[in-house]
Image (cartoon, helix red, strand yellow):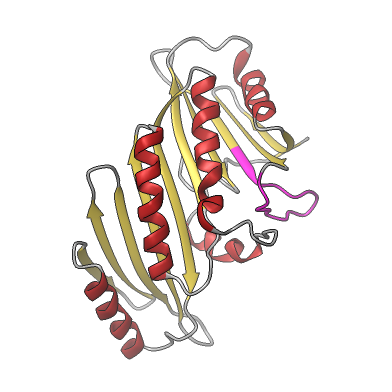
Amino acid sequence: MKKQAYPFIFLLALLFMIVGTCRYSPGEAAGNESLRPLRTIARVLQNNGIEPKQWIVYTREYSQQIQNDAAFFQKLDELKRENRAFRWSFEANHHMKKATGIYKRPLFQEKIQLIMTATKDKPQTYILYEAKGLNWSEKKWEEAAKVIERKTHQLFVKQPTFFTCVNGEFSGNMKGGLFHNALHLLREFQATPVESLQEESLVSLSAYTEQWDSVLPTNDHPMNIQLALRERLGGKTSIVVGTPIITIEY
């Protein structure tokens, strides 16, 4: 396995570039199948004594129709009408316009963003959606998944690529070290390592599993799962697992 020189911290600009490269087999992205990996991740963590603390679903779509300010604000008015329960804010500078709507549900929080960025040729506009919940239970997730499916169906023209992450915590002392435990978790996902980073208190791995059809091509090997383990103060270890990549900082 090759070592990378930096942690997998993926920001918005990088997501814009790579989200279109994910591939799906026919029919995979229909219904609950798009969100199935998140449930699998949570179950694997629980089965290994790791308490899921937070889960995140993220997706976005490029809007070809919005290429000027008038179209941007027209779309923003539409989003506000269709999502009246959301609290909206707006910010702008010479390079970007961004409107953000947030709705704090009892079980989780939803966020919608409309972002236009300036480029040399023409503005690029994206609609982004994020759902974020604390802790984990199967019953709560089933309810949340239905809301997420309805909302993404409303927001997006095409079936979007879903990025899912679960952040957990192991309170005891891990036997065998971080790298050993990271490899063990990958085996639980039936995943083959592709790239790795090892530091004194941090291990991160990129891998590929045939369980999920979403694939992010790389220079050498495809990948569709990442996990990171970091030792914290007090003898605790934080674990983040994401597919096809981790989309939160760890």
Q: Quadrant of residue 149?
A: bottom left
Q: In the image, 69: left or right of 207?
A: left
Q: In the image, 104: left or right of 133?
A: left
Magenta span: predominant SS is loop
Where residue 85 appears, x then y in whole percent?
Answer: 19, 62
In the depicted view, which residue is nearer to us: 24 or 27? 27
Q: Residue at 78% x, 35% y: name it.
A: 1
Q: Quadrant of residue 93?
A: bottom left
Decide: is 178 above or below 197.
Answer: above
Residue 74 seen in the current view: yes
Where residue 62 appears, x then y in whole percent?
Answer: 50, 74
Q: What are the residue bounds of the magenta stretch?
A: 212-226
Q: Residue at 38% x, 13% y: name it.
A: 234
Decide: is 244 above or below 123.
Answer: above
| The magenta stretch spans residue 115 | no
| The magenta stretch spans residue 219 | yes
Q: Quadrant of residue 95?
A: bottom left
Q: Residue at 65% x, 53% y: name it.
A: 214
Where residue 66 appears, x then y in whole percent?
Answer: 42, 84
Extreme residue in the right direction? 220
Decide: is 108 above or below 234.
Answer: below
Circle count = 0
Q: Residue at 54% x, 23% y: name it.
A: 201
Q: In the image, 127: left or right of 89?
A: right
Q: In the image, 73: left or right of 123?
A: left
In the depicted view, which residue is nearer to us: 228 or 75? 75
Where residue 177 appears, x then y in whole percent?
Answer: 61, 15
Residue 230 seen in the current view: no
